[in-house]
Image (cartoon, rainbow, N blue to C red):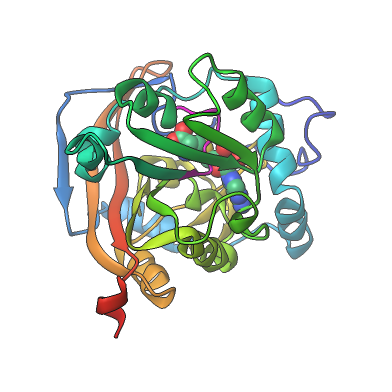
Amino acid sequence: MALSKNESSLDDIKITPPQEEVGSKDQIPLCVPGQTKTSAARVLTEEELDRLSGERALVSDFKQMKLEKEAQKNWDLFYKRNTTNFFKDRHWTTREFEELKACREFESQRLVLLEAGCGVGNCIFPLLEDDLNIFVYACDFSPRAVEFVKKNPLYCPERCCAFQCDLTTDDLRANVPEGSVDVVTLIFVLSAVHPDKMKLALQNISRVLKPGGIVLFRDYGLYDHAMLRFKGSSKLGENFYVRQDGTRSYFFSKEFLAELFEETGFQSVANDYVLRETVNKKEGLCVPRVFLQSKFTKPGQSDSS
Ligand SMILES: C[S@@+](CC[C@H](N)C(=O)[O-])C[C@H]1O[C@@H](n2cnc3c(N)ncnc32)[C@H](O)[C@@H]1O
């Protein structure tokens, strides 16, 4: 993905591998449903281990600060270049997370969902199309992404409320009533947030979640193929890298994620690596992908006493 100088002030950062995103339209699963859930991290070859352990963070503090300052701009430019054409609709969410189906049990039961970091809506529109008994709050810090959501023909204010917000700085309660949400989805979003600020995002989410409500999480896992393709020149810190376009990606170990949620007051319900092989259509290569798929609840009133 070539960047013009006007589009990115990050052209002085060395070229990293092309942006390779889960569910992007260049990736197809090799042998669906060939995914394995496991509690153990992917085992690396000696060569891979040597390479990773020899890597130091080479991006200067100045550039790191600039990346943080320009994070919103860089995601907004991502949507300017790719519009709604980058990610595929995520039709797998109801298969993987049965909590999303709970609202169909009783007609009167309406599920209130917050899709935090919604992008252009690839997660929410399949849900809205599928289920009439759902209300979705959807936020993203890219104003362009939010506009794309609002322009989608499936968007209607009776069932959906999209708004712009930085999860790490803007109080969600400005748009979502406190303690009103049943389910929060965090799908490939926390990886884009600086590790030092992830807890702020979770605290923010916790305030709008009902006691007993749940966060459904899926994101890049430790030693994912995309992580191993980054060069040392793109390394920002432990398991944290910058792409060519200035967007960043963290690769989660299950221990790191559990600690992050538990320190924010959540309880772990599920936390597993998902291993699957995908074919990169452009390169004709079969590559091992690793994701982390997890669920955390906010304790109910009786649980916390
Ligand atoms: C890989 S996309 C995932 C979009 C969507 N969840 C999906 O499943 O298609 C990551 C999104 O996180 C958003 N994002 C990153 N940091 C954010 C922050 N601090 N606050 C709100 N949104 C953020 C980006 O703008 C981007 O749209």
Q: Is residue 167 above or below residue 96?
A: below
Location of residue 5 in the rendering, given as x and y in whole percent from the top left corner: 83, 29
Residue 163 is a magenta residue = no
In front of the other: 132 or 228: 132
Horizontal side, residue 6 vs residue 226: left or right = right
Q: Which image quadrant for residue 108?
A: top left
Overall secondary structure of the magenta stretch? Answer: loop
Tell me where residue 151 sits by quadrant.
top right
Q: Is 298 placed left or right of 20 in the picture? A: left
Q: Give whichever of 49, 272 is nearer the camera.
A: 272
Give ligand 1's quarter of the image: top right
Which residues make up the magenta segment?
115-123
Does 168 appear above or below 186? Answer: below
At which x and y percent is residue 33? 15, 28
Residue at (26%, 78%) from the top-left corner?
Answer: 302
Q: Position of residue 94 (x, y in %)?
A: 25, 34
Q: Is residue 288 visible?
A: yes
**What is the x, y in percent for residue 54?**
47, 62
Residue 2 shows in this picture: no
Viewport quadrant of the N terminus:
top right
Furthest-right residue in this view: 6
